[in-house]
Amino acid sequence: MALFFPSYAPRALCTRLLIFTSCLTLLLFLYTLSYSSSSSSFSLSSLRSSFSSSSSSSWDSWSSSSTNNEPFDSSKSCTPSEYSSGQWMYAPRTTNRSRLEDPRRDTLEFAGFQGCASSREFLWHLASDNEAQWDRFPRVSSWKWDLSETSCAQTDPSSQSGSGMRDLEDEKNKRQLVTDLVQKGGWLVLGDSITEGHFFSISCLLYPHVVATPDYVKNHYFDRAWPQNLYLNPDSPLVTENQLSYPAGFNMTETPLVTFRRIDLLLSLDELRDLHHQKHSEPTDFTLFSEEAIWTMSPSEYISDIFLSPLPQANYANLIVSTAGHWTTTMFGGYSNETDKEGVQHHGEGIDGLIAFFGEAMAYWADFVQKALNNDENGVVLADGTRLRRQAMVRAYLPGHEDCHDHRDPWKEIEPMKWNWYNWGSIWKFNEVFETLLTDSKYPDIHFLAIDRPARLRPDAHATGDCLHIMAGAGVLEGWTEYIWHYVTYLTRERRKM
């Protein structure tokens, strides 16, 4: 049965009350909304901020072991010149040993190394192969590069002794560098025996997380020109505890993290002969090179066939080179203006002429490398599948120190040379030529690292047999690694996006 409401006064009153109540409710709602608009706006803003902060925080904590570049932080922009403005500070490690007795065990302990992956000339690299110089230890291994008075001091607040860099004696940092080499790409390190010493030092810094090839204990006759590699150690906790992600195609036993190749001149002898013939008028009997031993290679080989090799053969992100030591008028005999061992007087242009040719040769090299990087469409593969542009760095070369084995402490300032052995007195000119060349904007992916000053202040830190090579464990070579890692992490990432 249908319900029926007759039309009379109580019904009309109810209708009016219903309309009035609805209007009042609407007015109260609008007033509340107006009153709380600023508060609501703040809440939404806070929500966005909270979400952004949370996301950023999560990203930052993950990115330290991720494959992507870290958010830019201008406080971490320590440039090569700023890094080089520090001083050596005495900072002995805690040890119960006051002198060197066991050349292997003690030098590793004094240097803060757990061991070294490379087996090539082990004691020579650690400068413990000559008992007559054991009195240097442990003092020679007790210095830190101090940046506390420079703008680099705050780049890493957790660093020890005011170094400003991530200290690779810290196990956390050591694991992080290995992680970066796996997930962000490896290093191809090219140069002469000074650079070989740097490679040996890296093998100590990253031990036991890396293994090295070849094994010079099993066969010490391996040629200097053969590659030396560091690979991820399958027994490293980074592997056994599943702390790593890998780029697609990465092979633990095939993909090197760091490779050293002995390349003294950066160009082949034939390339240099051809370039010299193009640039200079040569007498009919002109011979550019002497018979001095040399190890070198064309960039057409080590760039195309090595540096740009795809996974699993390689996954290099950074090319690190250094040259000048073998650019002498002895090696480049056509430039000699001296009397040789046979008493023959030569009439070449001398060291200044050779430096000018060095500039022409390095321009040729830089043109080749930059073009190869421009044409590289693949880039380095990161663990998350993204890719970045590869890049090259030129580390400033070093002269030696005359009478180095008479010294037992660092210098405060670089002291002048007395005799200018070899080309040592002109090394700064070679560095200046290369650095000036790379300021040209047409070389955006090649960077000059003028980080030679820490080594220039360490006459006490040489190998036992000469005054040019730097020992591992004195802090010089280790500082190169810490700074290069800092540089590629913080100073170049924005340019590398593909």
Image: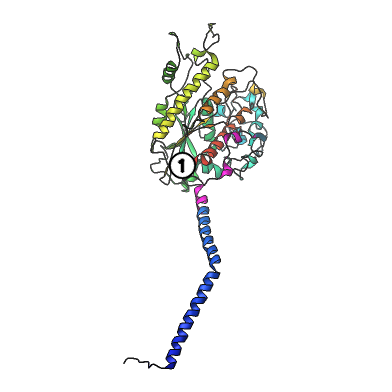
| Residue 428 image offset from top left, x and y in percent | 58, 24
Is 324 situated above or below 209?
above
Residue 377 in picture, x, y percent from top left:
38, 38
Q: Position of residue 210 (x, y in %)?
A: 49, 38
Q: Is residue 121 visible?
A: no
76 above or below 432? below
The image shows a total of numbered marks equal to 1
Quadrant position of the N terminus in the picture:
bottom left
Please state if 426 lies on the left or on the right of 16 as rendered. Answer: right
Would residue 27 be seen by someone viewing this image from the given angle?
A: yes
Q: Nearer the viewer, residue 244 or 187?
A: 187
Query: Over which residues does the magenta segment extend?
Result: 58-86
Q: Nearer the viewer, residue 11 or 281?
A: 11
Q: In the image shown, does 318 or 311 lie closer to the viewer?
A: 318
Q: Find numbered disc 1 in the image and state the secondary structure of the residue it sits on.
A: loop
Q: Residue at x 65, y 18 (%)?
A: 418
| Residue 412 covered by magenta stretch | no
Q: Quadrant of residue 46?
A: bottom right
Way the structure is coloured: rainbow
Label 1 packing within 10 angstroms: few (<14), some (14-19), many (20+): many
Q: Say which quarter of the image contains residue 109.
A: top right
Quadrant of the frame with the C terminus = top left
**Residue type of the residue flagged with mark 1:** Lys
Is residue 389 found left or right of 428 in the rendered image?
Answer: left
Tell which of 360 and 220 is nearer to you: 360
User: Where does label 1 land, which residue?
Assistant: 184
Residue at image location 53% in from the left, 72% down from the top: 32
User: Does the stretch in magenta take in 66?
Assistant: yes
